[in-house]
Structures are given as C-alpha cells and as structure tokens.
Amino acid sequence: MINRNPCIANIKAGYLFPEISRRRKEFAAAHPETAEHSHRIISLGVGNTTEPVLPHINAGLVEGARKLGTVEGYSGYQDEGLQSLREKISAVFYKGKFQADEIFISDGAKCDIGRLQLLFGAGVPVAVQDPSYPVYVDGSVLAGAAGAWTGTGYQGIVYLPCTAENNYFPDLSLLPEKSLFYFCSPNNPTGATATGVQLEALVKAALEKKVLIVFDAAYSEYIRDPALPKSIFDIDGAKRCAIEVNSFSKPAGFTGVRLGWTVVPKELKYSGGESVNADWARVCGTIFNGASNIAQAGGLAALDAEGLTEIRRLCDFYLGNAALIRESLEKLGISSITGGDNSPYIWARFPGRDSWDVFTEILEKCHVVTTPGSGFGPAGQSFIRFSAFGHRADVEEACARLERLKG
Amino acid sequence: MINRNPCIANIKAGYLFPEISRRRKEFAAAHPETAEHSHRIISLGVGNTTEPVLPHINAGLVEGARKLGTVEGYSGYQDEGLQSLREKISAVFYKGKFQADEIFISDGAKCDIGRLQLLFGAGVPVAVQDPSYPVYVDGSVLAGAAGAWTGTGYQGIVYLPCTAENNYFPDLSLLPEKSLFYFCSPNNPTGATATGVQLEALVKAALEKKVLIVFDAAYSEYIRDPALPKSIFDIDGAKRCAIEVNSFSKPAGFTGVRLGWTVVPKELKYSGGESVNADWARVCGTIFNGASNIAQAGGLAALDAEGLTEIRRLCDFYLGNAALIRESLEKLGISSITGGDNSPYIWARFPGRDSWDVFTEILEKCHVVTTPGSGFGPAGQSFIRFSAFGHRADVEEACARLERLKG
C-alpha cells in the first residue's frame, strides 16, 4: 500500500490527554467501587469546562440556531468569519487597533495552531517554553519541522526551560534566529503570567533575532491583576513580530461549541517581504471553511456588555476552584506552587519524583485524575498540573481527598 | 524576519472562489444598476446552500444549543465526535459495516481533506481527476506534495483527464503506483456520477497499484438513480484501499453549520503495515478538537426518519433548480452538458472558448455569476460549471436571462 508520512513515525504514540483518558478508564475498570458516588473518579486533569453556558450567551447560541430555519436568517459559508464578530473582537480585546481583515475567526486555538505551521513549513526552527502545551511540539513534528524523539524531547525543537529558578520566564538568549517561538501567557501548564516588562523583553528579542512569536492567549480572561498584559499587542512593536491565537473555549465555556480567533497583523512580513496576513487568508481559504455560524452568533452575544459580565462571572467561578485547590496543596506542605491566581491551572512540584508516578499515586489514593508535568516537556518532570475546571462539589471533594497524600 | 514556507510560493495567488467573489464585487462596483432588483447579480457560482434548514433538523440544532445552558445537558470537548452520531452514520450510510471508531466526525469535508495530507506527507505522488475540486490540488501544494505552477497545472500532480470522450471516467492505467488518488462522485464540477462497474474497476486498480483513494462523497444524497453507488464502500475490497469523506453541508444545508465525517477503515494499512486509522486518530487528536456539539445535535436529528425525509426534500428542491438550468442550456443549443440529474452541478462546454471569457460574458450580459471550468484543472478549459444552489425565483430569473447568450 501507500507509504506512511515519515513524520508521523516520529511522534510518540499517545497524545497526552488521550493517554490520561486511557489510564483513567483502565483504573475504573479495575476498581468497580469507583462507580459509587463517594468513590467516584474526579478529574482535575484535562482543561475541559464543566459549567453551563450562561443565559445571555446561551440565548445568542439558541437564536443563532433558530434563525437558520428562516428564509431571512439563513446563512451558508462564512469563510474567515462574520464581519461584525471580527470588528467586535478588535474593539473589545484590542482597543480597535486591528482592521476586521486582520482577525480570522476559527474553530479554536488548537486547530489554528495546527494550520499555522503551514505558513513556515518544515524548514523553520521551532522554539517552545518548557514545559508547554503539547500541541506546539506535536504539530511541529507532524509538519516535519522537528525530528525523532530522543527520550526527553524532539530533535530540532529548542526547549527554553521555565522553572522556579527563572520565575517561569525563559532565558531569551537561547532563542534561535529566524525561529517560530510558541509563547503562552497565562501559561498552560505552569499558570505563570508574563509581566509587561517580560513581554517587552520578548518583543525586543524577537525583533532583534527575526523571530516570529505565536502568542497563545487562550487564558487571558483569567487575568485579574490589572498590571498584567492580556495580549502581546499591548506591547509596542509586537505587530511586526507576533501572531496571537485566542479562544472562546475557556472564558465562555465554548470547549464543545468551537470558536476562536487568530490575529495576523498586516505589518507582519516574512524575510522576503511577503505579507503573512495574505498567506494566512490563503491557507484558511484553502483548507478551512470557517467556524459554525451558530457558534459565531454565540460569540457576538458573549462580547456585548451582558456577555462580558457573564464571561467575568464564569472565570471567577473557576478561579474560585483554583483557590481551593491551591490552598489544599499548600496545606500538604508543597513548597513550589504557581498559578491559580490569574490562571485556571496550578503547577505543583513533587521534588525527586517521576510525574507519572505521582499521577498514579493521586489516582490510586484519591481517585483524582491530574496531568503529569513531564507530558508538557522535559522541565515538567516532577511536577503535576491541577486543572480548576470542575463542578464546585467535585473540586471540594477532590481537595478533601488530597489530604490522603500526607505522610 | 522568519522565512516563508517555500510551498506557499508555489500556490497561485487566488483560490478559485475568492477570485470569483473579487470579480463579482468589481463588476457590481462598476455597474450601479445591479443594485436594482431586476438587474441584480444572481449567483450560480459557488456551491453555497441558500434554503433554510428544514424544521425537524433545525429543532435538533436549537435543542443542541439550548441544552448547553443546562447543568445536565452541558458538554465540552467531543474530540472524534459523539459516539451516538458515529454509530448512526454507520447505520444510515454504511449498513452498519463500520464500528464507531472507524467514523470520525469533522467540521466538514474540505477541512478533513486538508488534514488528510498529513498522513502521507510531502513524498507521496498525488493524482486527481481533471477537472476536480481545487482543494485536492491546493492542499497538496501546501503540504509540499506538489511543486510549482507550470501554466496549466502543478508539477508533481498527475492529472487524469475526465472528458466527454471517456464519459468523464479516467483512464486508470495512468494512475501512478503508491499514489494518493482523489476521486469525487457525484463529481464536482462535472456532475458525472460513477457507475458500480466503474468503481469496481477503480478499486481493482487501486489494490493492484497500491493506491489510496480519497473518495469524496459530499454529493451522494443527490443520487436518484438507484443503480448508482453512493459510497465507495459499496464495492468489495474498498476497505483495504479507500478513505471516504462526506458532509452534512449539501444534503442538510449545513454549509454554515459545519459538520462532516471521514471513514477510515481499520483494514487500511500503509506499506509498512501500520494502521492508517490509528494515525488518523492521532492527527485529529493533535490538531483538531472536534465539530461543534450543536452541529452534532443537528446531525443526529438529520439522521432519524424525519430528518432523512427532510434531506430528501431539500436535495429534491435543488435538483429541481438543476433541471431548470439544464433545460435552459439545452435550449441555447449547447451540445455537451453533463450533471444536473444525480448532482447539483451542470457542466457545459463552450467549444474553442476560454472559460474566464465565457464567465465574463455571462456576468456582463446576464448578471449571472458562474464558475469557469479552467479553475478546476486543465481539462476544464472551455467549460462552465453552473451550480443549482439558489432560491427558485433567482434560478428562474437567471435561466430567463441566459437566453441573452443566444447568437
């Protein structure tokens, strides 16, 4: 038969979250008592939203669906997205500093990250924060921009460690020239949020080294400290070196609805002077057909005054969960904990231990699913990521059970 | 700055449909009289659905949206799709011959075609019917599996002419060994639908030549002749050499809703014996996050008895348009016309003329937008594709205006 893409052979068999799901199912099958409510398995693992879409935003979705059944309200292909939604995103998140055709509506940040690799191809050097969201690296391997697994990382990927020692901000002198640098703030998984001074240093380094930053701002609405920037475009010069991906998934509970956006400024050029924005329009026009028009109607509702209040309320709820989890971990005497304040993730260190061993211990002793830090990169070894997405009663129960890890 | 993917430089500047849209806008701007109803521009161009989603299916979408606002009805990530929808698709379209995990729910056939290239990489030979839907070729160029534009086609793509002379079915002896072959039936753009005998020959050739067929069945619900196969999997042996992509866009009017599926049989192996199904799950898990759960709720409604009746009714409506268009073209004395019976596209030949010139003549004389055949490949030169998607009154008006092309 036909030959396999050799790049696929490079990628490790299990994407992190399906692997966790597999282990969870295996554990449940071996422990029938988990079927009882008091012994149920509780997930603080994958960052999947759990709370209903709030009423005003939900009404927007329902109305978006309803009007497709009418002659005057019906719509077909939307391609790069509704003009009104593109304008609204520019106004709400970027003080109107982008034109509508610099904002591309997507079916989510992860999907656009997969497509973004096509702009640069297999020859581009790729750098990531270490630890980082697995899709940056796995997507690069699929695109041929990275090679074989070496046991701790992929050949050709430059891992920039982000640890307690450097306050979770990388040493930018390690950034390769003309590379693609994936940077996420508030960070998944560490929960660390970059300061304005840090992002200024990042933009300066990118401009000097001709680096293109893919800035993942999927958790920006969880920022509560007004001093912290929510967008790379809050920084002067970023329009010449950055693309920003963002999503309605985590702020509006749209993980299943599928809606996001990507900002590609017209100022952004390749080394040959060609427009990155024009290429992105071409890539999306060729292999994408736009986000669901129902999701887009919901997105419009999410960005009016009432919708923005609901977004704040929903993020506050999950931040409340995060505070509970963080508190329980502190009670256990874990000294190195980040996140949970301006981020729905808490990153906790279990010194000297293997992440998957800690994952297994927590699953066995507490029936709580977490995410092993080593799944996010070599510097994640010995860490566990706790996700604050969950019903309050589940989070409270999980926190109580975490006490079993003592001694 | 960063380097551009050299593959993007290979691709022609305008994807066909955005180019048509640009010319339409240019014409409208230069002809203010088109703002009047009687002189309005009518599109028989892009295959974009125009009729409201029918009531039962629409109720499924509305209910899918509504329940996201409730604690018990809320759902997040669905990944490869709702189990119930995967099972239903297998039952309705494939007589249950596939397991749920051989059917992957997507946000549309075009999007999955873009991702499918990742299974085979840049090294795979690519063959297409000529003419064909542009995404097969453009996606291959983006993936590096094809090279520069030569003036009539892309280097490295094997174009298999489908013309009146061979009854729109290609000479399979031209098919390269171990290639990826995109095959579409009912065909976009020619409207030709392959017979069982033809598809048996195709599967036989694929098995002999170790070719993987990507069978695009996006228009299968337009088939009215019971003797014509609706799926490549109606043919014995296809499970060992074919992937099928399909979509709710054209049968259920979901072009804006975004829902499709791809069948990847477990029997399908690469030359090294690895499972294509396992790789596809990995690719989707890595750079895709599933179709909207609202769209999936609509898809479930579309596949129960009432929904299937609505699908038939909607396709019949567009086939009614197709019959009107075909009749008008016959009245003009055009001798070579295909499609319009088991397909929503009509393919008409204007001997000795350039497709874009005919496009322009029809736009100028009739204020009707069509699609120039040369946009679908070298063998499309001198042809025009007429799309039957439109309101009945618009199609009738367009048909009346087509008489202006006489003499």
Image (spheres, coloured by chain):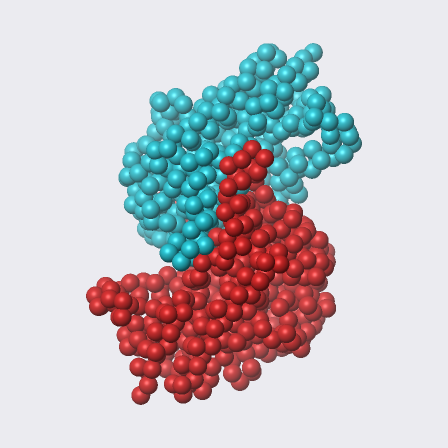
Chain colours: A cyan, B red
Question: Quarter of the image holding residue A311?
Answer: top left
Residue A376: x percent and y percent?
Answer: 57, 32
Q: For residue B193, say whether it is visible.
A: yes
Residue B357: x percent and y percent?
Answer: 33, 77
Question: Quarter of the image holding residue A375?
Answer: top right
Question: Quarter of the image holding residue A401?
Answer: top right
Left or right of A368: which side holds A303? left
Quadrant (top left, top right, bottom left, bottom right) of the N terminus of chain B: top left
Quadrant (top left, top right, bottom left, bottom right) of the C terminus of chain B: bottom left
Rendered position, A390 above or below B214: above
Residue B364: x percent and y percent?
Answer: 28, 74
Rendered position, A185 above or below A96: above
Q: Residue at x 51, y 36 (%)?
A: B69
Q: Residue at x 57, y 28 (%)?
A: A390
Front position in the image: B349 or A301: A301
Left or right of B86: which side holds A99? left
